Amino acid sequence: MIRSAKAFALVGVLVPVAFAQTMPAPAQPVTADGSRASAYYNFAMGSVYSLMAQAESSPDDALKAIQYFKDALKADPKASASYESLTELYIALKRPADATAFAQDALKQNPDNVDAHRMLGQIYFNQIKSGAQGQIDERALRLAMQEFQKVTEKDPKDTESWVMLGQLYAGTNDSSDAEKAYNAALALDPDNEEALTGLALVYGNNGDTAKAIEKLKAATDKSPNPRSLMILAEAYRNQKDYKDAADAEKKALEMQPENERLAHSLADDLFFSDQYDEALAIFAGLAAHNPKDISYPLRMADIYGAKKDYAKAHEAIEKAKKIDPGDVDPRLAEIRMFEMEAKHDEAIAALKSLLDDTARKVYSKEDAKQRADWFEELGKLNVDAKHYAEGIEAFRQMSVLKDSGPLIEAHIIETYRTYAKDLPSALKEADAALKKFPDEYIVVREHADVLGDMGRTDDAAKELRGLLNGPRDRETLLDMAEVYQKGKKFDEAGKAVDDAEKLSTSDEEKIEVYFIRGALLERQKKYDASEVAFRKVLALNPEHAGTLNYLGYMLADRNVRLDEAYKMIQKAVDQVPDSGAYLDSLGWVYFRQGKLTDAERTLVKAVDLTGPDPTVHDHLGDVYMKLGKTQEAIAQWNASVKGFKEQPASDTDPEEVSSVNSKLDAARVKLAQEKKR
């Protein structure tokens, strides 16, 4: 506390006199003129013996110090410094009962003794986390709060007690009173770092990150220190503002250059803000200083992967393997790297090898959970590689974990429905799963989704409606909206979205609702209303890639405001450069702008990434036709027609199919004419 600092500053002045004594001199007599001198003398002697007692663990010195402080208070009962020093000594000696008794005796003599209330408050405050395993002592917390409330009532200009009271209110999640207490402290001392930091934490816990950052910046601008800078960095991180988080951590690291934990956090935030080379330099230094810590080469592998320098990423992973050959983390990192490289077969082989090497007859609950997660990942890898049967078999192996049945069924149904486009098999699996798990939300929902894909919209909606009046109503309503949209029942879909919006409280939930509404309105060709919905998303998150892409594509498809469309789509592509859907949009806006070479290059890449997507093939066909490559255009439109046939009817726009067939017929006629020439 600040008062303690002042007390020890006084000790520094008086210590030489005190050490000149070979034996503690008797207290000076208290006279009308000498009471203040006696108080200072006894305080100085108590401070000396207090330091000696704590430095040498001497009980005798501790007793002498206590007696000197008590004599100082007899000489001057209003000497706050003596109360504070005695309080700190009792705390250091772990004698809270003696401190409590002393303060209570003082209050019997004078109930308005602010120093005694402050002493009790400090003692109780110190006991709050003294329970087993750091548990909160609710009684001590309540008593500390009562004492500091009395202190601030009797001495409303006591800044530190307001800060303590703010901390206590925050400890009971009373954010309103905590805010009032911290603001009272700041009214007395606008630059009080503890009050600013505490108030920022209150705002942060209430979700008001902007206010939290405002207070933290005020604290760090006035009096920067590692603690407040690290809290500021955390606030920025909560807003996913990793660049500003890194800037705050850089300042903190300058003050604590040996703090490796802080350096690690800084490197992570540099990585998340795409400052790859700076992050690599820090991790390289940490790795050199801690050669047996595998976490550093693994983080370097992540960064190299983000830079698409896969050779160096694998080198870093190999270093981690050599540090601890038995650790599975490097092997998991290698699997992730294969995934990033789209080397599905290598990733599958590596994960199978890991599962084989860790196979046991019996698994602990934790090991079973880990193994089930690995089989789930193996299933997803096989699905990505279009090995659907192997993926389904991997999902079934998740049964190593009890109670995983509903999740297994959901994965299998989803594989048949969404990826293999095998709706009969999906329905058969969903029917069996529903009989086995009739009350499982995830199973009922998957069954309804299959019905929706098969065009049985009313049956699907009925099943979903049966899931309402539960904890996942918002999620259910959005699924109902999708089912109705596929069934072209747009009014019902819109009502479901409206109902879901009423249950949406966070920005993230509102963004999801606005995006779905925008897409729904676009399907109805209500473009102006659709744009209004998408603009609401961008008002909350200007960098929302999905919305930037969708709105940009909608403009390009209508051949309007092409420059604006290009800027939005390019922003989306910059965020997710390997998204086939975003590249398709970019290629399409190039086509609309007449930049055919750019359009061809971009759409060829989009086709490679999206596979059988009929719309992407259609777009590339248009580009080839414009370039005079009739045969290549026909090949793309044939692929488009095939793609339409393979996807569920609910996902197909008859007008789009008709358009592709018309262009295909015209191209065939043109090709025949070209061959006759």
Image: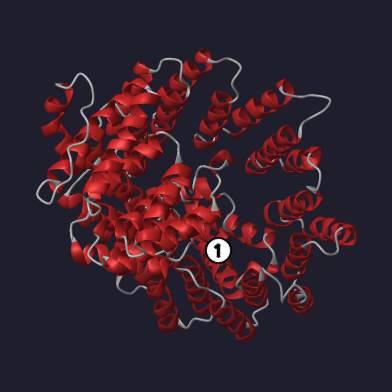
Q: Where is the C terminus found, in terms of image quarters? A: bottom left
Q: Position of residue 603 (x, y in %)?
A: 43, 52
Q: Residues within 10 Å of mark 1 (few under 14, many from 20)?
A: many
Comparing 30 with 269, the one in front is 30
Q: Is residue 78 above or below residue 247?
A: below
Kind of residue at disc 1: Leu
For the point 28% across and 40% down, which residue is it? 69
Q: Position of residue 348 (x, y in %)?
A: 65, 31
Secondary element at tag 1: helix
Q: Residue furthest bottom?
A: 491
Q: Position of residue 328 (x, y in %)?
A: 60, 24
Q: Position of residue 646 (x, y in %)?
A: 69, 58
Is residue 424 rendered to the left or right of residue 147? right
Comparing 221 with 634, the one in front is 221
Say if residue 201 shows up in the picture. no
Check disc 1 and report the residue beneath it: 664
The quarter holding residue 487 reads bottom right
Say if residue 110 shows up in the picture. yes
For the point 34% across and 55% down, which residue is it? 116
Q: Is residue 566 above or below residue 77?
A: below
For the point 49% across and 62% down, which residue is it? 670
Is residue 278 rendered to the left or right of residue 10? right
Is residue 410 rendered to the left or right of residue 571? right
